Structures are given as structure tokens and as C-alpha cells.
């Protein structure tokens, strides 16, 4: 299977559904999810840095999404609405040259009180994950994962 010459851009509106590519994305998203969970079990989220620019991401996130409450369940319909997609696209583009795989798909928990699960997980872009999880970590909302792992 060929997607065209190396370095060629694929127009997502005109691209066919490439099953192998989808499987690769899914594998990478699951690897990211399991790695993040394993890190939270070994270190309190409140002590964790996800990127070299966590402070910048958090301030930008608070400025662009002042209504977001990290403790609450994410409304996926709002997040993925036409307006929501536009807001997130504008936010994410600021990191195009700063964060590797800034627009790569990953798994995000809809609520910080729950583990990853079929009903608790949203497919999101990497920058959405970073912004939301940095906000959660700064408020100590993921510390329970570490505490639960070390209470046995």
C-alpha cells in the first residue's frame, strides 16, 4: 500500500479508509494510554511533568478554555461539536512546531475519578490530552492512582 511519495500530504477528506494505518494509530494510542497509567501508578500526578512546557500549555489552556473544570466529566459532544473542534484546532496549532505528535490521536479519560474504560474514555488529540491532564495533575486529581497502587 502506498500513500504517495515520501513527505506527501494526505488530504483526510479525500483519503480512503486505510485499515492498516488505523490499526497502527490504535496500537500507538493504547501504548500511550498504558504508559501514562503506569507512570501515574509510580509517581503522583501532582509531581509529574508531561512536557518541557507544561506551564505554558496550562496558561494557554486556562486562557482559551476558562470554563473548563478539570474535576468535571468532559462533555464529548461539546468538545467535538463544530465550535468545539474549531476552538481546539486553534489551541493546538500553537504547538505544531513545539510538541512532537501534537495532533496524534490518543485516549483521554472523560473524568479524572475513573480509570480508563470503554465508557470512561474519549478519543482525543495529543494536545487535548496534555492540556487536560496537566490541569488535572496540577490540582492533584490524579494522585489517587498512585495512592491506590501503593496501598496494597
Image (cartoon, helix red, strand yellow):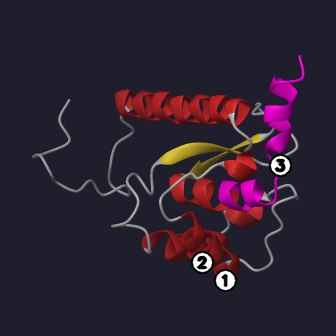
Report x, y in % for residue 93.
Answer: 44, 72
Q: Nearer the viewer, mark 3 or mark 1?
A: 1
Q: Quadrant of residue 132?
A: bottom right
Q: Main secondary structure of the magenta part?
A: helix
Kindly give the residue lying farthest to the bottom in the view shown: 63
Residue at (54, 74) in percent of width and height: 91
Q: Are marks 3 and 2 in contact (CB under 8 Å)?
A: no
Q: Is residue 104 visible?
A: yes
Magenta residue span:
133-152
Real-space Cα separation, disc 1 to disc 2, in angstroms: 5 Å
| Residue identified by numbered label 3 | 111
Kindly give the residue lying farthest to the left in the view shown: 5
Q: Quadrant of residue 41?
A: top right
Report x, y in % for residue 61.
Answer: 64, 73
**Quadrant containing the C terminus in the rendered view:** top right
| Residue identified by numbered label 1 | 63
Residue at (68, 54) in percent of width and height: 133
Amino acid at each position: 500500500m502506498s500513500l504517495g511519495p515520501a513527505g506527501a500530504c494526505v488530504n483526510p477528506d479525500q483519503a480512503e479508509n486505510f485499515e492498516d494505518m488505523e490499526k497502527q494509530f490504535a496500537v500507538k494510542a493504547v501504548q500511550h494510554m498504558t504508559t501514562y497509567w503506569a507512570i501515574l501508578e509510580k509517581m503522583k500526578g501532582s509531581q509529574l511533568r508531561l512536557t518541557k512546557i507544561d506551564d505554558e500549555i496550562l496558561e494557554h489552556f486556562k486562557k482559551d478554555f476558562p470554563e473548563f473544570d478539570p474535576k468535571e466529566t468532559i462533555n464529548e459532544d461539546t468538545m467535538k461539536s463544530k465550535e468545539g473542534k474549531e476552538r481546539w484546532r486553534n489551541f493546538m496549532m500553537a504547538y505544531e512546531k513545539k510538541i512532537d505528535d501534537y495532533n496524534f490521536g490518543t485516549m483521554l479519560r472523560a473524568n479524572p475519578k475513573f480509570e480508563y474504560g470503554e465508557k470512561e474514555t474519549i478519543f482525543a488529540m495529543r494536545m487535548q490530552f496534555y492540556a487536560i491532564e496537566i490541569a488535572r495533575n496540577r490540582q492533584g486529581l490524579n494522585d489517587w492512582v498512585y495512592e491506590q497502587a501503593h496501598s496494597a
